[in-house]
Amino acid sequence: MINQKYASLLEPFEFQNGISLKNRVVMAPMTNYSSNEDGTVSDAEVAYYVRRSKGVSMVITACTYVTPNGQGFPGEFAGHTDDMIPSLRRLATAIKSEGAKAILQIFHAGRQVPKDIAPNGDVVSASNVPSEGEGKPVPRALTETEVESIIRDFGETTRRAIEAGYDGVEIHGANTYLIQQFFSPHSNRRTDRFGGSLEKRMTFPLAVVDEVQRVVKEHAKEPFIVGYRFSPEEPETPGITMADTMVLIDRLANKNLDYLHVSLMDFWSTPKRGVDDSRSRIEIIQEAVGDRVSVIGVGSIYSAEDARKALTSGIPLIGLGRELLIDPEWVQKIEQGREDEIVTELDINKQEELEMPTTLWQRILKNPGWVPGV
Ligand SMILES: Cc1cc2nc3c(=O)[nH]c(=O)nc-3n(C[C@H](O)[C@H](O)[C@H](O)COP(=O)(O)O)c2cc1C
């Protein structure tokens, strides 16, 4: 029997487009470095998702690249050609067969593409500004025609997601990748219609949203979820401030999106600069968008109590990332009133039991502090 204290986590939820979720907990997108060499999803990867798709109401997949020069990691599954539709379908079917909605995260890594993965070593971005840190490649600034082509590529991968049976796509505008690079005054020093003022830095992100929505209108026969993920601030100067983000989310909130997903490592983190408000970023964002669009919050929500508290911020949905690596039965334990048994530190002897693909497992073990318990 469920403990009534946590009942709010298991309440159903309905998006404005009519699609309903069985509860308030979604799986956050996590790259697993484990796809096949040819860009198709691997058996280990599918097993990993199956194991984590029973409890949560919606699974947002690892990011898939919309064009070859957007691949951000080795072992990332591809979404850039129609040849990949069977692979994409295999993943959607696996997730949905366990009862969760399947959302494909679509992206281009821009200047974060490792030079050895970039076709011909050609790393591209909004401008020729490298990211901060040792040995980062100097990217080539995309031409206006190339930018327009990438916008269409986001639409093409959305069409493939529809054909492959996904319930929606999440536009990955967060975590320093290309969409964020266009919005950021650090990486975008353009002087054409894609850069210059704050207004112009929004041109690319908003054009991607418009194109994805155009394709959905044209191709989807049933309601199809479109979400947008963003990182509210950057540490660099110049860099995205909370003030910039307030303008962007106001625009996004008027676009009839199904959700905004705020990418944070700490759910309750507070703004660094740009607004005179001591509340958490998530509360500020929720208040600003109101009921125009649903908000997903994420970041170090480990226990049932953490999750219950997160919902008191006023947002309707929470995302779990690392927690589901550690404990794939997180939601089921709450359903069964066994929330005290939720595991919050990775047991490094349980790779097989946890259905963790080997490359992801090795990366976690090599990066102490990344996942609790390691
Ligand atoms: C192994 C790993 C891979 C990740 N890959 C992605 C990704 O592909 N796309 C993305 O938007 N965020 C990615 N993230 C960030 C998570 O979605 C999430 O925002 C972050 O881990 C904080 O949430 P958590 O505390 O619940 O783990 C990744 C995080 C981890 C730990």
Image: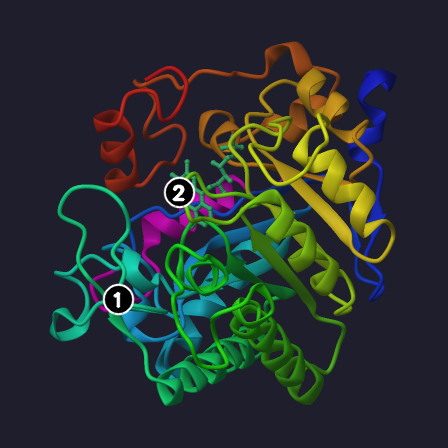
Q: Is residue 324 above or below residue 154?
A: above
Task: Give, as a three-letter code, the residue at label 2.
Answer: Glu
On the image, the x and y values in percent for residue 359 come to: 24, 41
The CA span between labels 1 and 2 is: 16 Å
The local crowd at label 1, few if under 14, some if 14 to 19, many if 20 or more residues have their Cα within 10 Å, is some
User: Which of 279/267 is in front?
Assistant: 279
Nearer-the-camera pick, 2 or 280: 280
**Image height of 58 relative to 151, above or below:** above
Asked whether disc 1 touches disc 2, contact meaning CB atoms under 8 Å apart, the reply is no
Q: Is mark 1 within 8 Å of ligand 1?
A: no
Image height check: is 179 above or below 146?
A: above
| The quadrant where residue 108 appears | bottom left
Image point (72%, 31%), residue name: 277
Which type of secondary structure does the marked residue at label 1 adopt? loop
Specify the segment rendered in magenta. Answer: 36-54
Q: Is residue 123 above or below residue 365?
A: below
User: Would you say 295 lies left or right of 182 here?
Assistant: right
Q: Quadrant of the N terminus?
A: top right
At 33% across and 64% down in the image, what residue appears?
A: 110
Q: Is residue 29 magenta?
A: no
Q: Looking at the image, what colour scheme do you see?
A: rainbow
State the image coordinates of residue 145 (x, y, percent, origin top left). Answer: 38, 90
The residue pinned by badge 2 equals 236
Which residue: 64% across, 78% down?
A: 210
Image quarter where the C terminus lies is top left
Residue 288: mark in rendering: none
* Residue type at numbered disc 1: Asn
Which residue corresponds to mark 1? Answer: 128
Tell me if residue 55 can be seen.
Answer: no
Q: Secondary structure at mark 2?
A: loop
* 92 or 129: nearer the viewer: 129
Q: Nearer the viewer, residue 31 or 182?
A: 182
